[in-house]
Structure formats: C-alpha cells, structure tokens
Image: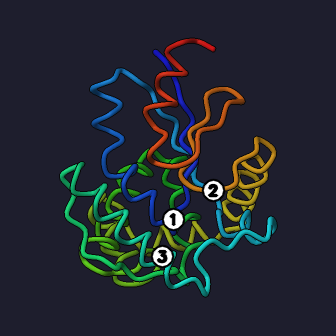
Amino acid sequence: MTTIDFWYSVGSTYSYLTVMRLPQVAQTDGIDFTWRPFNVRHVMTAQNNIPFKDKPIKTAYMWRDIARRAEQYGLRPVLPAPYPLSGLVTANEVAVLGMQEGWGIDYTRATYRRWFELGEPAGEEPNLSESLREVGQDPERVLERAGSEEIVHALSSATADAMTLGVFGSPTFAVGHEMFWGDDHLDDAIAWARRGS
C-alpha cells in the first residue's frame, strides 16, 4: 500500500480540513497515511515566519477560505474559531503520546472538532479532558504522561525531524523527500505517491 507521511500540528487552522477528512480519503484512495504531530509554532518562530500575526486582512481571508473549502467537504465549522492557541504545545504532546499508544488519530479528530465546531480551544479545558474521554482515555493519566520528559523530548525530536525534511508549515504531506504543503495539495501528494516518483 502507498504510504504518505502527514505532518500536522494541532494549532494549524488549515489542518482542520485535512484532519476531518483524511480517514475517508485513506479508505477511498487506498493510501496509508502516517500521522506525524510536530510543533509548527517552533518551526515558524525559528524561520521568522508568523503568517497571520498583526495581519487582519490576511486573517479574514484565511477564515473565508477555510469556510469555502469546508463546505466543499461537507464540514460545518463555526468560524472564526479561537486562534491562536495558547495550549498548542500541550495539544501536540498529547497527540504524540496518542500516536504511541494507538488513539492519537481519534484524539486529533476529536480535539479539532471541539475546537472548530464547538469553539473550545484545543490544548485547553474543557477540550482536553472531553476529547480524551471521548476516545476512551483517562485525562489525568494522559496529561501527566504527556508532560513527561520522554514525551516532551519526543515532540521536540519530531519537530527537528520535520525541519530536517524541509517542513515549514502544517499540514504537509511527504512522499519520501518530496514535500506538498497545504490541504489543497493533498491530491498532488497522492498522485505523486502513485507515480512512484
């Protein structure tokens, strides 16, 4: 089966569009996606690339663009969603732990749904605990484990790996060393993977 690395960061607005439809895309297209959470804020800060800070016109466009694309996918977000996220790092530490333990995809989808459809910021309460309970996890256990040195290091390592590959934003789809940035390039990534290039 064709495999594509899906680099994403809970906290990226456009990643909502990918996160909420990727399992269906995988099933329909016969693609195996490896979900790879990382800290996009660290990457953007390191590269002096803060796309929407103090840019109200660009921000307004972003929300309208997401709304249009969401409608195409049959999604119903309530926009604008709370942004930026103060709990971005925590949300991604939980995602890293979830990927290790096998519930990371379900958590990511739950936390994005609560963020974009219920207005509860990801990485904060009540989103954190409710999303974890929704996927059958004990919030107290998970949050203690997610803040451990091991998981903090795992997120930092994943972020370094992303930067080494040339990932600069979320979502990014990697086919080997070929990068496709943005939800609107998912089909391009799938086509490239199928070519075996």
- Of the two numbered discs 2 and 3 on the same chain, state the one appearing first in sequence: 3
Q: Which mark is residue 169?
A: 2
Q: Residue 20 location in percent, x, y?
A: 32, 52
Identify the residue shown where x is 51% and y is 48%: 99
Identify the residue shown where x is 31% and y is 45%: 21
The residue type indicated by label 2 comes to Gly
- Cα gap from disc 1 to disc 2, whole angstroms: 8 Å
Relative height, residue 175 to residue 131 (above, below): above
Q: Which residue is mark 3?
A: 123
Mark 1 residue element: loop
Q: Nearer the viewer, mark 2 or mark 3?
A: 2
Task: State left or right for residue 186 relative to residue 78.
Answer: right
- Of the two numbered discs 1 and 2 on the same chain, state the one appearing first in sequence: 1
Q: Nearer the viewer, mark 1 or mark 3?
A: 1
Instruction: Assess whether mark 2 and mark 1 are in contact (beta carbons under 8 angstroms).
Output: yes
Q: Quadrant of the C terminus?
A: top right
The residue type indicated by label 1 comes to Ser
Q: Residue 193 location in percent, x, y?
A: 54, 20
- Of the two numbered discs 1 and 3 on the same chain, state the one appearing first in sequence: 1
Q: Which residue is mark 1?
A: 12
Quarter holding residue 111:
bottom left
Quarter holding residue 77:
bottom left
Mark 2 residue element: loop
Q: Residue 51 location in percent, x, y?
A: 62, 71
- Cα gap from disc 1 to disc 3, whole angstroms: 12 Å
The residue type indicated by label 3 comes to Gly
Relative height, residue 118 to residue 7 (above, below): below
